[in-house]
Image (cartoon, rainbow, N blue to C red):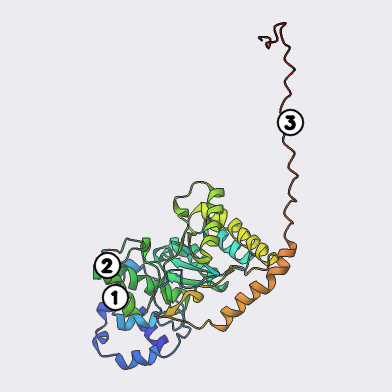
Amino acid sequence: MIGACLLACLAASAHAEKAEKKPVQKAEKKADKKAAKPVATPAATEIEPALELGVLDPKRIRTLTNDPVLGKADRVDGDETKGVVAFTFDDGPNPDTTPAVVDALEKYNVPATFFIVTRRLVGKNGEKPREILDRILKAGFEIGSHSVSHPNLGKANPKVLETEIDGSIRTLAPQANRAVGLFRPPFGAFGGGGNVRLKKLGLTDVRWSVDTLDWQAKNADKLRTKVLTMIVKQQGGVVLMHDVKPITAKVIEGVLDDLEAENCRRLAAKQEPILPVSIHYFLKDGKTARPIPEPVQKRTAAYRAALPARCAKRPSPPPPQPVPPPAAPPISPPVKATPDGKPAQR
């Protein structure tokens, strides 16, 4: 049912389909009860620019957002769970910078979620970004929508919201060959209309608690130190970075190495590490945390199990250098007295 609806969505624009006006409530209810099934991915040349597509009725596009694991959760703010950290990256994929971010994540076996600006995926210029998106998915990372063109949606009218949110899903879901359940508003700007739109579509709004401000950082060393300091201070959280920024691509491996070093220090001190996890660990329905899928649990357990061996291979920190004793103050020569017993003038 979901696959058929998806193919219908891709066949023609919404305003040209009279069939969309017919009641589809029964089919929709059945689709909502099932997990999204794999669907055929169209060839890259068949993906139309999202901004040129007609707007889909929410009842139809919900087949593209029907993710029972990630979708329809309460808004994620990053403070839902302590002791774990989830890395998220916005605005990509960028062929010049995103691969380095993916390389670092794979090297340290750290999960992440990428929020995609879908205009990067369309047309001839989208060929390389589509390849990177495919690599992201094959590596087991999560993805979400970050709109079509990254506008400020704080005061957006319904038409703009439909174009930016529905349009992005209409491009991203077929290209990723899966339903998309996550959305992050550009700049974190969202009004009541946006919230209503996400609820209708069944999308989970994902924000952050560790704002690295990497987009305006100038000094790589300071940025690297800042990220770990914020993670430790907040005992984890949802980290916001941007895989399109050269400085982020430059420092992310160091950030992950610093996190591993901190966890090794904690193990040595018999303290709990701050585990890097997927966004699943922050999803809630009301006050109830969502069950963590078994494959996600296994990935987290694998990181924890491998940590002692990785710590053993890390270079030992240099031993503390002995502090030299302070230099003795200079000894003044004795002052000679004059015949009258008074100190001589110098």
Amino acid type at circle 1 is Val
Residue shown at 30% from the left, 64% from the top? 153
**Pointer 1: residues within 10 angstroms few (<14), some, or many (20+)?**
few
Is 45 drawn above or below residue 32 in the view shown? above
> Horizontally, is 331 left or right of 114 in the view?
right
Q: Are marks 2 and 3 in contact (CB under 8 Å)?
A: no
Residue at which label 3 appears = 328
Residue shown at 74% from the left, 38% from the top? 325
Is 79 drawn above or below residue 35 in the view shown? above
Q: Position of residue 12 (x, y in %)?
A: 32, 78
Q: Position of residue 268 (x, y in %)?
A: 70, 65
Q: Quadrant of the N terminus?
A: bottom left
Q: Foreground: 258 or 163? A: 258
- Quarter of the rendering containing residue 150: bottom left
> Horizontally, is 179 left or right of 222 in the view?
left
Q: CA distance from mark 1 to mark 3?
A: 74 Å
Amino acid type at circle 3 is Ala
Q: Are marks 1 and 3 in contact (CB under 8 Å)?
A: no
> Horizontally, is 144 left or right of 273 in the view?
left
- Quarter of the rendering containing residue 339: top right
Amino acid type at circle 2 is Val
Q: Position of residue 124 (x, y in %)?
A: 43, 62
Residue shown at 24% from the left, 67% from the top? 157
**Pointer 2: residues within 10 angstroms few (<14), some, or many (20+)?**
some
Residue at which label 1 appears = 196
Could you tell which of marks 2 and 3 lies nearer the N-terminus? Answer: 2
Residue shown at 52% from the left, 70% from the top? 82
Could you tell which of marks 1 and 3 lies nearer the N-terminus? Answer: 1
**Pointer 3: residues within 10 angstroms few (<14), some, or many (20+)?**
few
Residue at which label 2 appears = 160
What element does badge 3 sit on? Answer: loop
Which of the two marks, 2 or 3, is nearer to us in this view?
A: 3
